[in-house]
Structures are given as C-alpha cells and as structure tokens.
Amino acid sequence: MNEGEVIAFSGGVGGAKLSKGLSEVLDAKDITIVVNTGDDFDHLGLRICPDIDSTLYALAGLDDPVRGWGRRDETWTFMSALKQLNAPGWFNLGDGDLATHVERSWRLHEGQSVSDVTRHLARSLGISADIIPMTDDTVRTRVRTSDGWIDFQSYFVGMRCEPVIEAIEFQGAADARPHPDALAALRGEALRAAIICPSNPLLSIDPILAMPEMRQALFACRAPRIAVSPIIAGKAVKGPAAKIMAELGMVPSASAVAQYYEGLIDIFVLDEADADAKLPTGMQRVVASTLMQDAEDKRRLARIVLAAAADLARAAR
Amino acid sequence: MNEGEVIAFSGGVGGAKLSKGLSEVLDAKDITIVVNTGDDFDHLGLRICPDIDSTLYALAGLDDPVRGWGRRDETWTFMSALKQLNAPGWFNLGDGDLATHVERSWRLHEGQSVSDVTRHLARSLGISADIIPMTDDTVRTRVRTSDGWIDFQSYFVGMRCEPVIEAIEFQGAADARPHPDALAALRGEALRAAIICPSNPLLSIDPILAMPEMRQALFACRAPRIAVSPIIAGKAVKGPAAKIMAELGMVPSASAVAQYYEGLIDIFVLDEADADAKLPTGMQRVVASTLMQDAEDKRRLARIVLAAAADLARAAR
C-alpha cells in the first residue's frame, strides 16, 4: 500500500477492532487513533476511560474476546472484597483492569495530562500506534431521560441503557481544545485517510465532532474521509446504537448513519446486508463484509477501507 | 470476668492477634484498639495503613494465617498487570486488599478522617470492637541508615529491612493530637486495663507513645497497665524487632523490652522461655506461653492478661 498517515476516530469495542486491523496492515507509526473521552468518569477516586482502555487492550492483544470489554484472563477478587465493604459495586472493575485505572489516576493526580498517561500506558503495553484522547480537556457525555439529565455511565452501566433517551449533550465540548496532534494530522499534507470507525455515531463519534475545531478540521480535510457503518441490517453489532437512534427519531439503519455523517465523509463502507441502502448524493459506497469476528476480519476490513481511500485519492488527482 | 473497658495499643500482626483474642473473650463494645499509623504511606495515589488493615483483617477473620499479612484467599492479578505497565511493583497489593485501599483513599479524598474511614471499614466487616488510629494527624516513621533518612516502607518492604538502622524518628508526632477516644479511655473511671500488645516496641508502639499527650495519659493512667513481650528467647516472633534493637545498642531480649516500658507499665507478661528475665524494680512479672499460633492461643493469652490486670486492681483496692 502507499505511504502516508492515517487518522482514525474511535469509540469503544467496534472502533478498537478496526483500529487493531489498521495497526496490523499499516506501519504502526503512521496511525493516530483519536479516542472518545466523553464516557470517562471518576469512580471510587479513580479515573476510568472506557474507550481508551478498550483501544489499549485491543491493540495490545489483551482484550477479552468473549466478554467484549476489559482484559482477558481477568479475576474479580477486588469486586467481591469491595462489595463486602458496602462500597458502590455497580461498575465492574476486573483486578487486572484496575492496574490501568490506578496507574492512570495517580499520574493524573501528579499533573500529567490524559494524553501523557495514555501514551505511557500504550508504550508500556508495547503499542506502536499513537493513541490519543480527543482532548485533554474535560468533556462529559450526559443523557436526558424522563427523570432528567444523568451521567453517561450511570445510564450505560448503572441502568443498562434501559431508560429511553430524550436528548444527549457533551458538557464542555464547545470550549474543549481538540488534541493538537489530531488537528495537525487532519490538516497535514501527509494524510492518506481520515477514518470514522464503526462506533456508535451518537455516543462515541459525536462527542469527538462536537468540538467545533475538530469538526471544522474534518470538514476541511483534503484527504479521503471514510466511515464504516456500525449498523448491520438495522442492528448494532454491539451496544445500544440502534435503540438510541430509534429513541431520537432516527431509523436505525446504515442509511441513517450515512446521512448523519453527510458533509463529513466522502466514502461510506456498509455491510453486504445493506448493499442497497440509500446514501446521500455524492457519497461513495463501498460494500463489504463488515462484521469483525477474528483477527483476519479486522485486517481485511482495514485493507478495504485503505484501498477505497487510495482509489479516491488517485481519482481526485 | 469483671466489667469495664479495655484499651489496647497495637501495631501489626502480633498486636492484631492479641486484639483478636481480647475481642473474643470480652464484650467487643468494651474494647478500644489504638493502632499505629506511623507506617502509613501513599503509594500509587492510594493511602495504605498496614497496621490498621492487619487489625481489621484479623478481627474480621479475613487475615491470611500462612502469609502473615494481607487477606486470605487472595489473588494477584493487579500486581502482574501493574508490572506490565512498568509501574512501581515493590509493594505487593493483593486484589482483595486493594478494595480496602481504594475505598479508604476516596473517602479520605472526600474529606473523611482516618478514624471515620477505619470505623466504616470495621463496621462493614462486621467488627464490633472499636478500632481507631492513634491520631487523625499525620505521623510518619522514618529510619536513618548509612544512606540517610528514608521512609519506613521503603526500608521495611523496599529494602526488606536489610540496611542497618542508626536512628528512628516519627515525623509529626510531637505536634499530633492523639485520638480523643484513646485519651478519654485512658483517663476514664471505667478502664480496667491498658494493654500494650506484643508489637515491635521501637516501630509500632513508640510512634503511639511519641505523641506527648498519649504518653502522659498512659503514664498517669490509674488502671493496671500491662505489656506483653514481643520477644521470646531473644527473637522476635515476626518482623525485625530483635535486629533493630541490636542495631540501636539494645540487647534483644524480653528484659530490654520491659526496661524500655519502665514507668509506663505495671505488669509485664513474658514467655516461659524468659521466665527468669530481669525486670525493672516494682514491675510485676507474669510468665505465660505467649506464642499465639491458633485462635485458642489468642483467647488464652487475652484471658491471662485480663486476669493479671484484675488481680492487680484487687490488690490495689
């Protein structure tokens, strides 16, 4: 494949899978993965960054393929001891996973930025790709239900996504400064593709694009911009994307995702099951098998995405 | 046995064993256990209180009888993940033990005192005896070696007590306010015994008595004051007491411990192996089997200590 840098915008598990594929088919130093931090929260005095951790574990090969979150070969002694202490037990923290949160928290407490800590963790885990938070400022996703506004993790984990969502907000996004390396990559001459991973558009990608400068930079980006649908045949591969889209008045479909990204992407990769989905005028269609079940699936989808971007770049020349 | 309150001064494992015995032979509500906090330290952003935790685990029946510290049925996934992150791994933290440190740390961070948190932990673990830190102020034990002053845990765990100790200090002790409930117990009419547990005199009991008001209150206490020797036949049952006594120019013996407590205790309980040890004039001798290997040993020694105190109280009437 041709040379150049790639930037990928990612949320949790689905995005982490494609990021893993990209990191294996590209020279890892050419990839910047910009991760949603709207889901981050403080729990028991620890800073927890679910999407960054999913990305770290996936790229380090430590992710649990069955559970779909956290680390493989995990133990749960901490949680059972914690419950014995009558401490809040609604958010599951594996014993190995806890090392990430403890290490991150004391470093943040010492004054390091989320980026600094993320890069330290990535290096320690042997990851060459550059994983950065979307911002070092605080952006917090909140959802409105019939009971009012609540924090994202209370909804997502505490209430298992059961309440109907009436609205979503990203507190702090309007004033947050996007990570400078993300902006530099989007504006750089060396960029060969800007990729929106198959993550939840409303909860994982929107917080990133809710920062005006980031949205503007993606809008103005001259490299091919390409998104992969997280919806297959009307269903999310994992998580509540389809449920929430429906609650917010969208048809949960690949079409609706494509429409949501109109103006921000040039190419939309959608599953064979949605081959005929209607796309906005001018948006290029790539049909592929988008379900990533094993390592080869991830590499294959990464190659398809990169090839589509390369084709478009050649055509535009 | 007769009614009345008991106060016990304790360090880690040896003191925790006798405290456990006392809590089983007495009405638990009549016992105040005053625990050394000079060994406390902050590690990875967590507050660790080794002697309080040993006491909590012992009284809750959660202590590990083989390892001698930490919780039983422990797992170590956190430590192996932590080492993978290149984080400091010199201080072993079990997965279950970590729940105590995390729960304590965020509560301290919220503004609760060490006493508040200790009582919360004790209640959660079903402990009825009152376990209190010697003070809610910060006192930190430091030792001087040929390389200068170092923190206690760096010496104790990091260097496995290997360097020769030239001096010991308890930073903050001169200005620390002893826990008011400890002072109230020592000064109260209801006290039937003040007990110095078989803990390291120089590292576990001295920090408590280095607070002038506490020392004065024990000095002036009108109830029988009784210490149990942590040294048997010139050796510490556990830990570096004998080594450190020798390094500081004391003969490591039950005699030397008794002499060290002169003026502060009325009765000294020493092991059968030391039956003939020389005691300071006027100090009463009680010879017993002081090794506590099982639950019955702890109760037996507790009964001996309480009976000796009761005898002295009767004789003084």
Image (spheres, coloured by chain):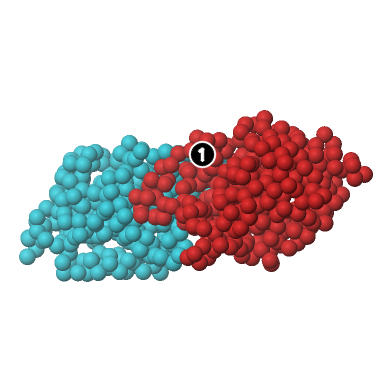
Chain colours: A red, B cyan
The kind of residue tagged 1 is: Arg
Where is residue B242 drawn, in percent x and y? Answer: 34, 44
Q: Mark 1 points at which residue?
A: A67
Q: In which quarter of the image is the N terminus of chain A?
A: top right
Q: Quadrant of the C terminus of chain A?
A: top right
Q: Does the rendering let one see residue A248?
A: yes
Q: Is residue B109 left or right of residue A262?
A: left
Give the chain letter at badge 1.
A
Q: In this view, does A223 lie to the left or right of A212?
A: right
Element carrying mark 1:
loop
Above or below for B74 versus A165 = above
Please identify the residue farthest to the top as the structure is shown: A296
Residue at (54% x, 42% y) in the render? A69
Where is residue A274 drawn, in percent x and y? Answer: 68, 40
Where is residue B233 drawn, in percent x and y? Answer: 26, 39
Residue B218, quarter of the rendered image: bottom left
Residue at (64% x, 65% y) in the render? A172
Q: Does the rendering let one see residue B143?
A: no
Where is residue B168 drawn, in percent x and y? Answer: 42, 55
Residue A113, quarter of the rendered image: bottom right
Above or below for A200 versus A30 = below
